[in-house]
Amino acid sequence: MCTNGVNTGQFEQMIDQIDDHIKLERRWAHTLGHMAGDAGFATVSEKMHAAQALLDDVRALLGEAKDALEEDAEGASGVTVNLV
């Protein structure tokens, strides 16, 4: 469905792609944080785990964006085209 020139289905898929990418980067930040900690690099480990937490925040915001997409599309005052 397109609303105001935006294909909301594709838009949602793009948000999902970003989320998948961030999920992978979060996993790497977690792994590297533990590797650094095991090697005695406490500050690096702390920073990597902080980065991991920020990536968790990014994923939460992406989820909120997906929810808002549907709400905004419903409230849009423009042309809506549905594929039949």
Image (cartoon, grey):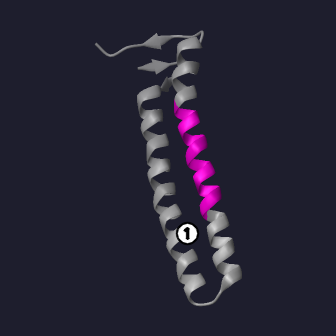
Q: Answer whether residue 55 is magenta in the image.
A: yes
Q: Under tag 1, what secondary structure?
A: helix
Residue 4 in view: no
Residue 16 lies, in percent from the top left, at 45, 43
Q: Residue furthest left?
A: 84
Percent of width and height locating residue 57: 63, 50
67 vs 5, nearest the viewer: 67
Query: At 52% across and 33% down in the image, what residue appears?
Result: 66
Secondary structure mostly taken by the magenta-highlighted segment of the chain: helix
The residue nearer to you, when weighing 42 against 10, is 42
Q: Which residue is mark 1?
A: 29
The residue drawn where x is 58% and y is 27% is 68
**Height in image: 26 above or below 44?**
above
The image shows residue 59 at horizontal and vertical percentages of: 55, 48
Q: Quadrant of the N terminus?
A: top left
Residue 30 in view in this figure: yes
Residue in the picture at 42% in, 38% down: 13
Q: Position of residue 19 (x, y in %)?
A: 49, 48
Residue displayed at 57% across by 90% down: 39
Q: Is residue 58 left or right of residue 83?
A: right
Quadrant holding the C terminus: top left
Structural crowding at the residue carrying mark 1, measured as other residues with C-alpha within 10 Å and reported as few (<14), some (14–19) or many (≥20)? many
Q: Could you tell whether 14 is left or right of 57 in the image?
A: left
Q: Amino acid at mark 1?
A: Ala
Relative to 64, is 59 above or below? below
Magenta stretch, residue numbers: 52-66
